Image: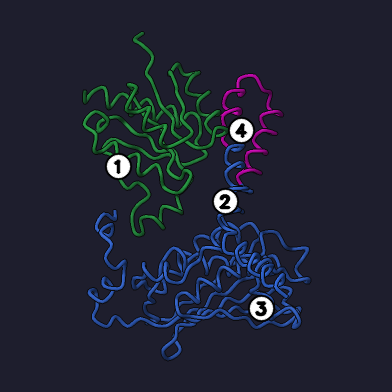
Amino acid sequence: MSEPKRLLIIDDDPDFVAGIKDILETANYEVDACYDPDEGLEALHKENYDLLLLDIMMGRGAEGIRIARAMGQDARLRDMPVLIVTGIQEQMAFLFPGQPVHPGFVDVDEVVEKPVEPSLLLDRVETLLERAGKNA
Amino acid sequence: MLETIALRREKEMLREHFAAIVSHELKSPLGAVQQNLYVLAHQLAPKLDDDEKDRLERMKVKIDELIKLIHTWLRVMRVDVSKIAESFVPIPVARIVEKAVESVSPLAVRKDVELRALVAEGVGDVMADEGTLVEALVNVMGNAVKYTHPSTAVVIDASRDGGEIVIEVTDLGVGIAPEDLPYVFDDFFRAKSGREAAGGSGLGLAISRRIVEAHGGSLGVRSELGKGSTFVMTLPTYDGQGDEGAAQATGLPGDVSKETST
């Protein structure tokens, strides 16, 4: 088998992250986690990740959206698959009135809602990585 | 005297920020517990016997329900007149009733309650945010199903009375005592007479009234103890002046996101 894929989770709740991190590691991914949006962005710039799992509501507000937008403007990060893991379905309506839940922040992203079924999470991660692999 | 003012201000602050506090202090940790429970259930599945799996499954259901309840609370605090009005479009009243019936049906079937929807011809449209208005009617109808006697009917009667649309929801239940009537729409209210039948947060009707009022309507009730209750929802009619254009203009002023709807 090839080298394990590297994933980054940015979510401000370490307890929440613990669960999904474990699932992903059991599935042989190498997983880093950042609990602070700014640290997360820094890690994205410094390291080479294959996929980002991103929370939306962190700290002061929709910090995840800020990160997704910053990635869209960065030539190196633009094509990294982003899986949004969020519990904000209804808050979304307030942030983007009239929009579907999936606002298409970044071209290749996907949205799953908290809580996410482990098998669904693994499935989405795998699909996104495969798709990214084909496009590369 | 000064202390009283300070105390009052603190209470106001607390009330204003209640949604944020509940969200942060309750929802986030519960969300983490919920996610970890999902993960553990997944990981332990091969090692557990059926009884253990069943217990874990029941815990999942309980946590899911708790989180749903918190979402309901948050919604009550958040039902904001100006926000709802931003997404108003003309919607046939018949469709609102149909959607609500569809949603309450499973509950009615379980109690062998017939949902009888009578929508008068030409009842027309209402300017509404479909999701929230349906939710308001679902709450009222769900309440009727909850309190009506088993194997009876709940009648939903939508008609037009001059410039008003009137939707009446009538149950054949225990009714509401006259002394309780003024409080039916208060947050967390639950009638004494119905206590044994109760369940739920006691917020449904409070939310409904707020939603209906945000639509420029009203929600009231008349009831006779032992005979049942009729909840009366009135809404302003919409007669399509300026047809499509007018409807568009009232939705989401200056918001580019409108074009991306699917």
Residue type (three-letter) at the residue carrying disc 3: Ser
Residue type (three-letter) at the residue carrying disc 2: Ser
Residue at label 4?
B37
Q: Which mark is residue A69?
A: 1
Q: Is residue B184 left or right of residue A121?
A: right
Horizontal and vertical percent for residue B135?
51, 64
Identify the chain of the residue marked 3, using the numbered disc in the image: B
Residue B184 to residue A120: above or below: below
Rendered image quadrant of residue B52: top right
Mark 2: which secondary structure? helix
C-alpha distance separating marks 2 and 3: 35 Å
- Tell me if residue B40 is in the magenta stretch: yes
Choose mark 2 or mark 4, whichever is in front: 2
Both on one chain, marks 2 and 3? yes
Pick whichever, B19 or B145, lies toward us: B19
Chain coloured green in this rendering: A
Both on one chain, marks 2 and 4? yes
Horizontal and vertical percent for residue B130?
41, 66
- Tell me if residue B4 is in the magenta stretch: no
Residue at label 2?
B23
Residue at label 3?
B229
Choose mark 2 or mark 3, whichever is in front: 2
